[in-house]
Image: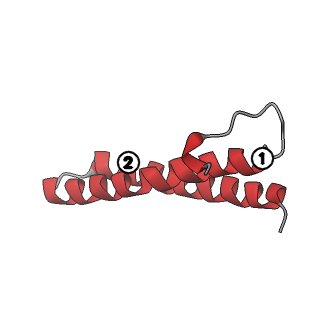
Amino acid sequence: MTLSEMSRNYQESAAAIHGRIVELRIQEQAQADPEESFRLRRRIDELMPLWREARELAVLTAHYYDRSYHKNEHYTL
């Protein structure tokens, strides 16, 4: 698998995670039960770092060999 293929996979994963976050937010706003609303909010909070990481890795793998690309310090050794 090449880095560009990995980048596309990360982009697809990020889109899927974001779609789920949007669904959960809609459910949360429509929820009357505070306990269920809290559960949905907690699940959204758990998905947010996964979404951010997938987006960051998509960019990193897409531009890994570009000389002008300033790499994210989070993913460098």
Q: Marks 1 and 2, how far apart in space?
A: 34 Å
**In this view of the protein, which residue sits in the foreground, 14 or 69?**
69
Q: Tag 1, which secondary structure?
A: loop
> Which residue in the protein does label 1 denote?
64
Residue at the extreme bottom: 1
**In this view of the protein, which residue sits in the foreground, 17 or 54?**
54
Residue at the extreme front: 77
Residue at the extreme top: 68
Residue 25 picture location, percent across and down: 38, 48
Residue 63 picture location, percent across and down: 78, 43
Q: Is residue 18 left or right of residue 63?
A: left
The three-letter amino acid code for the residue at tag 1 is Tyr
Q: Tag 2, which secondary structure?
A: helix
Q: Is residue 42 left or right of residue 60?
A: left
Labels 1 & 2 near each other (Cβ < 8 A): no
* Badge 1 or badge 2: first in the primary sequence: 2
Q: Is residue 58 left or right of residue 52?
A: right
**In this view of the protein, which residue sits in the foreground, 58 or 39?**
58
> Which residue in the protein does label 2 denote?
25
Residue 18 picture location, percent across and down: 53, 50
The three-letter amino acid code for the residue at tag 2 is Arg
**Residue 18 shows in this picture:** no
**Residue 46 shows in this picture:** yes
Residue 73 drawn above or below residue 32: above
What is the crowding at mark 2: few (fewer than 14 residues within 10 Å), some, or many (at least 20)?
some
